[in-house]
Image: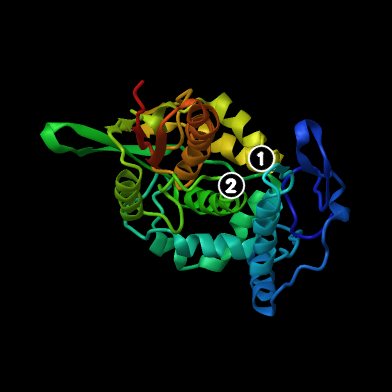
């Protein structure tokens, strides 16, 4: 086995024409994948130190640490062909990506069921991340239930907030990074929520300019009630497989979907919805809504309309606009 690589049972490095016009990265053995990934001296020393400190027999394999150019290659593949199906993404999650993911997290004092703060985790960051990486590589990573708390809303109501365990946040951020690289080329510009280079301000600016430019006279504002709590798990997996048919990534997503929610002394296992408060949830919701709303609107609705129309969406809030032509 190539040191430090993990993910699907088999990996791939080239592609062919697949069913339904898809380009599929061909399945091959782990030995067929790239061997010469750069390993920095500093990170190699980290792995050696962790192996020496471990009480277990020294069976550690030093991680292959990938450079920024490696992730850039994933992005290039994603932009090259919108029909490409990725079958080997999980092995890109290495020590360096986990470290970048930790640094990108919001550092607050709220803790999940693990009761571990970011500050406490950072006290021995390299060792903690290396052990997390090893559990991922060996298939021993276990997702923790999300802790649910309730906060006050206007009008005396309350809304639930989910707090995942810290290591779940780190791995979710790494997977969200990879999914973003392969899905960004597919997303329409009408989608502005949870995307780099997009914002509420940009959505409002585009809304104002298009309404004026197209002489819009009908406005429909819609909110998908309880989106994060009601996404169908089976449908979400089916949508993911169209673009990412990688067992490693799909297993991780499945672990988070089925990890459960802890409230007080009770744990429940929702049959639908994405992890509350999870770093991965905004990405999954964008992928889901791209398929069932944005793509449907562009390909099915717009061609059937006689007048001018457009759609603006920010997360689960969407605003279809139309200039109707009367007979």
Identity of the residue furthest to the left in this view: 155
Query: In the depicted view, which residue is nearer to us: 110 or 76?
Result: 76
Residue at image location 55% in from the left, 32% down from the top: 299
> Is residue 67 visible in this depiction of the protein?
no
Query: Image quarter for residue 252?
Result: top right
Q: Work out whether 235 lies above or below 181.
A: above
Q: Quadrant of the C terminus?
A: top left
How crowded pointer 2 is (Cα within 10 Å; few <14, some 14-19, many 20+) is rated as many
Residue at image location 65% in from the left, 71% down from the top: 49
Query: Image quarter for residue 229?
Result: top left
Residue 103 in the figure: left or right of residue 50: left
Q: CA distance from mark 1 to mark 2?
A: 8 Å
Rendered location of residue 270, percent (x, y) = 45, 25
Query: In the depicted view, which residue is nearer to us: 104 or 202?
Result: 202
Residue assigned mark 1: 243
Is there CB contact under 8 Å for labels 1 and 2?
A: yes
Rendered location of residue 224, percent (x, y) = 36, 29
Indicate which disc, 1 or 2, sits on the residue closer to the N terminus.
2
Q: Work out whether 230 lies above or below 210.
A: above
Residue assigned mark 2: 183
């Amino acid at each position: 086995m190539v040191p430090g690589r993990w993910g699907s049972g088999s990996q791939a490095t080239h592609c062919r024409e697949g069913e339904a016009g898809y380009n599929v990265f061909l399945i091959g053995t782990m030995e067929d994948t790239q061997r010469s990934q750069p390993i920095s001296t500093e990170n190699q020393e980290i792995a050696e130190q962790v192996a020496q400190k471990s009480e277990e027999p020294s069976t550690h394999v030093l991680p292959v640490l990938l450079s920024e150019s490696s992730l850039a290659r994933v992005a290039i593949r994603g932009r090259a062909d919108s029909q490409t199906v990725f079958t080997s993404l999980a092995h890109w999650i290495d020590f360096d990506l986990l470290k970048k993911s930790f640094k990108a997290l919001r550092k607050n004092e709220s803790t999940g069921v693990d009761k571990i703060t970011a500050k406490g985790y950072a006290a021995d960051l390299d060792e903690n991340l290396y052990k997390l990486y090893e559990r991922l590589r060996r298939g021993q990573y276990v997702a923790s239930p999300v802790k649910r708390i309730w906060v006050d809303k206007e009008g005396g109501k309350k809304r639930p907030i989910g707090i995942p365990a810290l290591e779940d946040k780190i791995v979710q951020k790494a997977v969200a990074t990879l999914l973003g690289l392969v899905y960004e080329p597919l997303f329409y510009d009408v989608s502005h929520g949870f995307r780099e280079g997009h914002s509420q301000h940009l959505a409002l600016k585009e809304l104002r300019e298009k309404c004026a430019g197209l002489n819009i006279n009908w406005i429909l504002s819609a909110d998908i009630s309880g989106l994060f709590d009601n996404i169908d798990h089976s449908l979400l997996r089916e949508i993911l497989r169209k673009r990412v048919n990688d067992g490693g990534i799909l297993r991780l997503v499945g672990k988070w979907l089925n990890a459960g929610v802890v409230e007080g002394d009770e744990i429940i296992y929702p049959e639908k919805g994405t992890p509350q408060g999870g770093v991965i949830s905004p990405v999954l919701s964008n992928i889901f809504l791209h398929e069932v709303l944005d793509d449907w609107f562009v390909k099915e609705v717009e061609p059937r309309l006689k007048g001018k129309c457009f759609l603006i969406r920010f997360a689960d809030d969407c605003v279809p606009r139309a200039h109707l032509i009367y007979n």
